[in-house]
Amino acid sequence: MIFHNRKIKPKSIRECRTYISRVTIKSEITRKTLHLTGLLIPVSYIYMGKELTLLFIAISIVVFFMIEPYRISKNTTTMIIEGIRPLFNEETFKVISRGFEMVDKKIREITRREEETCIGAHLYFAIAAMINVLFFPAELAMATITVATISDALAAIIGKALGKHRFKNSKSLEGSTAFFVSALIIFYFFIPFNYAILGALVGTAVEFFNVPPNDNFSNQLAMSFFIYMAMLL
């Protein structure tokens, strides 16, 4: 049988790119929806105080560290499924195994490439939040954690969905603008406007340059540090 090479029509290429873009945006929205659970920290700070909030973050960090090896390992789901097989009858086991496989698939879909071999953004975020709550004033800590949660999510989603003006690092003007504007609005409710502008600029810069080790860690602390230093002057 002879096979002839066929050129892919431009329409097919466009459809393929559109499909990939939609999948990427959907994954990013799912990821950032989970990221919004970071708002539990400022809410906890408001209603439960500093000490209980630190305890809540510390427990989260411990749990995250415990599950990280399993998240990174690609054989985790198979090992868990095989381990629980003797505990259930065949029908129940099939339902449970499908559930594990579905959860594992969703986790893989929202995991970024760099997180496949190192700790995830949630751990960086939690560690930074603990430092933030521990060392900075309450209003400032709550403000920067809220910005790091909401503005980061908006920048990523708008950048993926509407980003037309791209930079060499793949960041977009639209995404950075979304971060700055949303950060400025959030800061305005917590701190004076001049410090709000400073915080929004610092946060946008850290998010844009993806400052190591991870912007989920660097962003919070950079904003808190520079605003706090400005307040002391």
Image: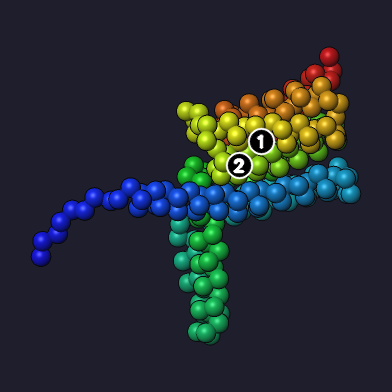
- Whichever of callouts 1 and 2 sits on the residue coming sooner in the sequence is 2
Secondary structure under badge 1? helix
Callout 1–callout 2 Cβ contact below 8 Å: yes
| Residue 136 x, y percent position in the rendering | 81, 31
Q: Quadrant of residue 148?
A: top right
Q: How is the image coloured?
A: rainbow
Horizontal side of residue 2 vs 92, given as left or right: left
Residue occupying image coordinates x 84% and y 14%: 233
In this view, the residue in front, 183 or 8, is: 8
| Residue 157 x, y percent position in the rendering | 60, 44
| Residue 8 x, y percent position in the rendering | 28, 51
| Residue 129 x, y percent position in the rendering | 73, 39
Please identify the quadrant where the N terminus is shown.
Answer: bottom left
User: Identity of the amino acid at label 1?
Assistant: Ala
Residue topped by disc 1: 178
Classify 10 Å Cα crowding around label 1: few (below 14), some (14-19), many (20 and above): many
Residue topped by disc 2: 158
Secondary structure under badge 2? helix
Horizontal side of residue 13 vs 122, given as left or right: left
Residue 222 visible? The answer is no
Task: Examine the rendered structure and indicate whether residue 54 appears above or below residue 184.
Answer: below
Residue occupying image coordinates x 50% and y 84%: 90
